[in-house]
Image (cartoon, grey):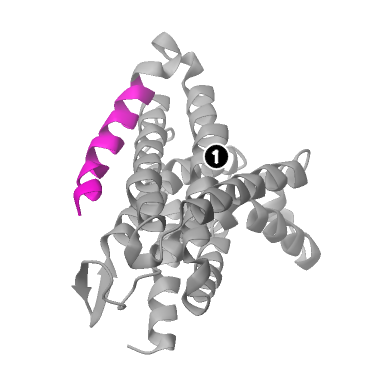
Amino acid sequence: MGVLGNLSLVFVAGLLTAFATGIGALPFFLVRDVSDRWNVVLWGLASGIMLSASVFGLIFEGISNANGGSFVGVGVGLLVGAGLVVVSHHAISGMEVNPRKYEEADFKKLVLILGILTVHSFPEGVAIGVSFADLNLGTIDGIAFLGFSVPLLAIFMTVAISIHNVPEGVAISIPLRSMGVSNWRMVWWSVFSSLPQPIGAVIAFYFVRTAREFLPIGFGFAAGAMIYLVVSEFIPEALEVGKELPGDGYRELVSGLSAGILLMVPLAFV
């Protein structure tokens, strides 16, 4: 497949994770609420998968000789990736995106909202793009799909971010539901909140494919961003949701984390 075909596949993978956010709105077609217990489990599951994918997938690939492995490069990438998330959080601190603005937004407001969401979700798209770095290069085993040899790491990372996006879609839909927003509009705005991810995925993929010497840094960058996101955002968000549960939701969080880690253990042996 040519460059355009590869970029298209990466874009579609990122788009799937955005669509997964819309899944978070679907339960409201049937019920008025989604239990906090299930939200915490999903946050934990996504966190476990992402932590394992970062260590067993991204970091291991970054130090692999097949990718010109470099401990220093991966280390630099880890710091830069975590730093990007810190800067992103600082940039959007105090700039909460009120779902009410989604419904009332004119063009200028939509541009502002999309800009904030880009800063917030761009690292997730980067992780997807970097995980596809070995697409069709034959450097690692992959799964044949529509003429592509898709790296297992890319599949795991896409699934992990998709799982994470489901409770995020629920969180977006809850206030929209309280404002009387229609079900299908809740789906649309949930998907809209993650649209920067396919863009980030394509940019990251193109960069690591055209600058292979920076591939270890790219793997480290994605891992650093993912690990820091899990520690600073996903787990605290899960505990915030679960604070009304018995035991403050720790049992549900640990259950989700454990399941996510166990699902990813085979990646260490691929």
Q: Main secondary structure of the magenta part?
A: helix
Residue beneath the point at 34% across and 52% down: 57
| Image: 29 above or below 237 | below
Q: Amino acid at mark 1?
A: Tyr
Q: Would residue 17 appear left or right of 111 to someone viewing this image?
A: left
Other-residue count near label 1 (Cα within 10 Å), few / some / many at <14 / 14–19 / ≥20: many
* Secondary structure of the residue carrying numbered label 1: helix
Residue 190 can be seen, yes or no: no
The answer to whether residue 238 is left or right of residue 80 is left
What is the count of numbered marks? 1
Q: Position of residue 96 (x, y in %)?
A: 72, 41
Q: Is residue 156 magenta?
A: no
Q: Position of residue 158 (x, y in %)?
A: 37, 57
Quadrant placement of the C terminus: bottom left
Which residue is more in the foreground, 102 or 47? Answer: 47
Residue 11 is left or right of residue 266, and the answer is: right
**Who's the residue at 53% across and 46% down the image?**
224
Of residues 180 and 154, the one nearer the viewer is: 154
* Magenta segment: 252-270
Instruction: Name the residue that disc number 1 marks.
Output: 228
User: Could you say which is closer to the camera, residue 140 or residue 20?
Assistant: 140
Q: What is the quadrant of the N terminus in the image? A: bottom left
